[in-house]
Amino acid sequence: MKAETIGNVLETVRRQSLPADDREYVVALHDYVRDRVRFGFTTGFEGVTPEQTLAMARGHCNAQADLLCALLRGAGFDAGLRFVALDKRILRHAVPAPVLLCLPSRLFHAVTRVQLDGRCFHIDSYIFDRPGFRQQQRRLRASGLERGYGLGRGAGCEWAGRADAFSQAEPGDLRADNPQFPTLAAAVASRAGNNTLLGIHFNQWLGCVPGPLRRASERYLNSRLGPAMT
């Protein structure tokens, strides 16, 4: 089977969605990432390329953002990554409790920035596909929590290309001093992020896991996600 590339995904999306204009095209690319890349943690974490995320069809928020950004740029749009300080309580009941306990209170979270028709939009509404989003939303509502299960306040999984749309970030997270990078690799190289466990970056922790144990590590990290995402 031929490996997916940014180029052939762009061709597939254009052929299947038959967009009438730029707005329909960027929305179709958003929906492709949402529907084809399941939210979850991999042992590659923030060391993965967009093509690797495509091949695995799984990635956490920053890997998904990096993939969508690569698709948007490949299609000719001005796009980049804007990193916000995400309240870690969003991950309550989405990751194992011992992992959550050791995380910093604010997480280095990428939202995708894209210029469209002279306006700048910020989105992360592609993180959960529709079944996964509905599952997590039901669980969040039943818990009575304001944030959790991977969802922020006012979360959604749809984007019409006319306003910002978020499933994890919240409008108040966008600040003038948010760091911006063209790619996830550039952000990691800058050491701007704080996605660490006990002060050590997740990439370093996961890089120490022996090959035979990597699948078990991924199963553990994703063990709190519901059946719609496992």
Image: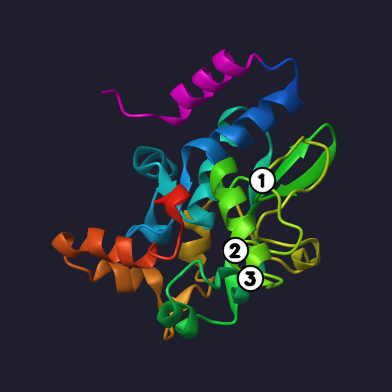
Please report contact status of discs 3 and 1: CB closer than 8 Å, yes or no.
no
Relative side of 213 to 105, left or right: left
Q: Which mark is residue 143?
A: 3
Chain-order first, disc 3 or disc 1: 3
Residue 131 in magenta?
Answer: no
Q: Which residue is mark 2?
A: 109
Highlighted magenta segment, given as a residue range: 1-18
* Viewer-side label of 2, 3: 3
Residue at 61% across, 49% down: 134
Relative side of 66 to 56, left or right: right
Residue at 54% across, 71% down: 193
Instruction: Tell me where residue 64 appears, x and y as whole percent.
Output: 52, 48
Judge the density around disc 2: few (<14), some (14-19), many (≥20) Cα neighbours within 10 Å: many
Q: Which residue is mark 1?
A: 157
> Marks 3 and 1, how far apart in space?
20 Å
- Which residue type does callout 1 highlight? Cys
Residue 16 in magenta?
Answer: yes
- Which residue type does callout 2 highlight? His
Instruction: Tell me where residue 105 appears, x and y as whole percent.
Output: 59, 82
In-front residue for pair 112/214: 214
SS label for mark 3: helix
**Residue 114 versus residue 63 in the image, above or below:** above
**Residue 142 versus residue 66 in the image, above or below:** below
Image quadrant where one finds the N terminus: top left
SS label for mark 1: loop
Relative side of 156 to 102, left or right: right
